[in-house]
Amino acid sequence: MEFVFWASFALLFYIYFGYPLAVKAFATLKSNPIAANDDYLPKVSILIAAYNEAKDIEATLRNKLALDYPLEKLEVLVISDESEDGTDGIVEAVAASTQIPVRLFRQAPRQGKTAGLNTLVPTATGDILLFSDANSQWDTQAVRKLCRNFADPRVGYVTGKMVYVHADGSMVGDGCSAYMKYENWLRDQETRIGSIVGVDGGIDAMRKELYQPLRADQLPDFVQPLKVVEQGYRVVYEPEALLKEEALSDGRSEFSMRVRVSLRALWALKDMKHLMNPVGGPIFAWQLMSHKLLRYGAFVPMITLAIVTLLLAPKGGIYQPAALAYIAFLVLAWLGRKKEAGGQSLSAVYAIPYYFMLLNLASYKAFFAFLRGEKKVIWNPRKG
């Protein structure tokens, strides 16, 4: 049992701390800078997939039309996945009121985001494809910041920086925001050594020539960047291309979203498992296994560590305080859930344990759905 304790502890430490520290050390020893150029301004196409987004779609389109980018090099393409709430009419009204091309396509019956993007891409006239969610608010400089990286011919895909905000626009303090800060820091380090292994999806860009049509059940935010790496190009992070997105207001909505994303990511890892073969590229294979495969499976050593810690606690030594610390962590997570349910704002003391447990419970649920062969193709708008 002692071996299981230390093996579980070591694996969890590696997943959340060891791997990031190793990437940081690697980036310090052997940096791979990007030859970015702020004057590089290619023609771009912004692609938006929407289903019943009447609440947000006009604000999203107005946000894109107000970007600081040459108007003659910008177009917006929207595909409505059989929306029934007036989304189509709103898009058409916006299109009629602007000189920037805004084109609406309708997909019926519903087939999901991936099928929608497959439909839009052949009609796009831009050299660079930009992907936005139907509720994403970009900084006015976002497109310039994304595109400057494509001046480097080795770069094929660029993702921006997402920050969670409250409905009034103020920053979210902890919890999911702390998680995003951690992820964004890690993406910055991974960029320095070559490519990142996870993108946001709400503020992404790629060379049109590299786009590959995907199956409707594949997660474009995960598989498409891996396809770019497969073709020999870099996938990088641009911290100055900002996206503000309203945080989900309750853990139940966040949990459902995380289960859905985790499930589709597991299928993506299965589809692209050849990239985890060190023969094809040892550094990226190590990154993909450490950052994604082990992260989604972290609930396993969490469970084994919990069990053996409680069983070993009576022996004293390190095991007794370890058991108390584990119990305290779970209590703080539970209290965070209770406080949130009661409408209270959470400090980091409660929010970080709560969100950590939420992520791993979502991975646990997604893993067993994956084993049952479940897949998610269509989606519903996020509820803030």
Image: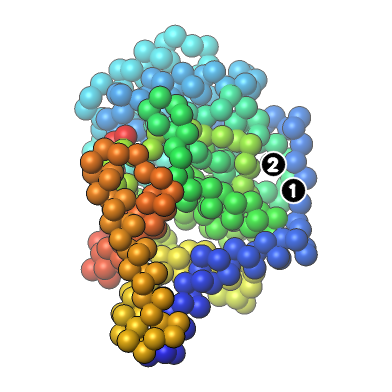
User: Residue at the spot x=34%, y=83% of the render?
Assistant: 313
Quarter holding the N terminus? Answer: bottom left
Q: Position of residue 112 (x, y in %)?
A: 31, 43
In the visual, does 339 lie left or right of 97?
left
The reply to whether the C-beta atoms of the residues labelled 2 and 1 are less than 8 Å apart is yes
Towards the viewer: 88 or 357: 357
In the visual, does 230 lie left or right of 154?
left
Q: Amino acid at mark 2?
A: Asn
User: Residue at the spot x=35%, y=54% of the render?
Assistant: 354
In the visual, does 268 lie left or right of 141?
left
Towards the viewer: 3 or 242: 3
Local secondary structure at mark 1:
loop
> Which of the numbered marks, if any, corresponds to residue 149?
2
Q: Amino acid at mark 1?
A: Ile
Local secondary structure at mark 2:
helix
In the visual, does 245 lie left or right of 331?
right
> Which of the numbered marks, if any, corresponds to residue 206?
none
User: Residue at the spot x=74%, y=32% of the render?
Assistant: 38
Quarter holding the C terminus? Answer: top left
Q: Position of residue 155 (x, y in %)?
A: 67, 49
Image vertical order of residue 186 relative to residue 301, above or below: above
Residue 248 appears in the rendering = yes
Towards the viewer: 148 or 337: 337
**Colour mapping:** rainbow
> Which of the numbered marks, if any, corresponds to residue 34?
1
Q: Position of residue 318 (x, y in %)?
A: 45, 82
